[in-house]
Amino acid sequence: MQGTQRMLRSLKDLFDSFSRPASLSANAQQHTLQLATAVLLVEVMRADPDIGPAEQQAVMTTLREKFVLADDELARLMDLAGEAAKTNYDYHRFTTRLNDHFTHAQKIQVVENMWQVAYADAHLDAHENHLISKVAGLLHVTHGEYIGAKMRAKEATGPT
């Protein structure tokens, strides 16, 4: 019970941080960026009705590499992202943080990472495709950059 309360408190703190970004410390801003990225990757995983271990591993590998996280930090981030994804009704709050703090190249990389998660199970679901397209638009990634990210991710994951 205490773990659930701690997670809910963390989620409340996260959502509060999206409404008052200027008041966050550099460490809190980094945590918010990590969580925003994680939520988007988890959303791609959840868009496929058949979530498999390959997609989960792709999310964890991407987050570990992008943010250089220890195992306990990664586990906590995955828990928070999973809970946030369940209560998510709007991607705008997550993409706004990324737009404010990521370079354009980093935003393209997020889209490519989303494609890697989608392709991880060798099956591209229509819901995954729609979600990534929507997020790419919110991140101001051009159609050409979106297609380039998709092709690089497909090539990196092998034939589907």
Image: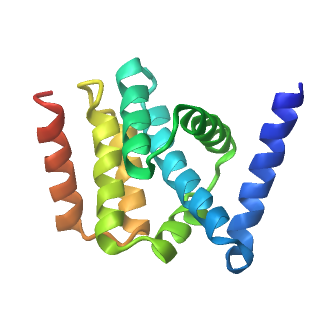
Q: Residue at x 64, y 48 (%)?
A: 88
| Of the pair 80 and 121, the residue shown nearer to us | 80
Q: How many marks?
A: 0
At which x and y percent is residue 67?
Answer: 45, 51
Q: Position of residue 23 (x, y in %)?
A: 74, 77
The quadrant in which residue 134 appears is bottom left
Q: Considering the image in quadrants, where does the N terminus appear? A: top right
Q: Is residue 66 above or below residue 135?
A: above
Image quadrant holding the C terminus, namely top left
Q: How is the image coloured?
A: rainbow
Q: Is residue 64 left or right of residue 93?
A: left
- Rendered view: 71 above or below 43: above
Residue at position x 53%, y 32% in the image: 71
Q: Viewed as shown, does residue 25 lie left or right of 123?
A: right
Q: Quadrant of residue 14?
A: bottom right
Residue 10 horizontal/vertical position (percent):
77, 47
User: Which residue does the image show at 72% across and 65% down from the upper left?
Assistant: 17
Q: 26 or 126, which is in the foreground? A: 26
Would residue 77 be found to the left or right of residue 134 on screen? right
Residue 149, placed above or below residue 6: below
Left or right: residue 23 versus residue 65 is right
* Residue positioned 48% across, 73% down in the render: 101
Vertical position of residue 148 compared to residue 105: above or below = above
Q: Position of residue 70 (x, y in %)?
A: 52, 38
Q: Residue furthest bottom?
A: 22
* 74 or 39, nearer to the observer: 74
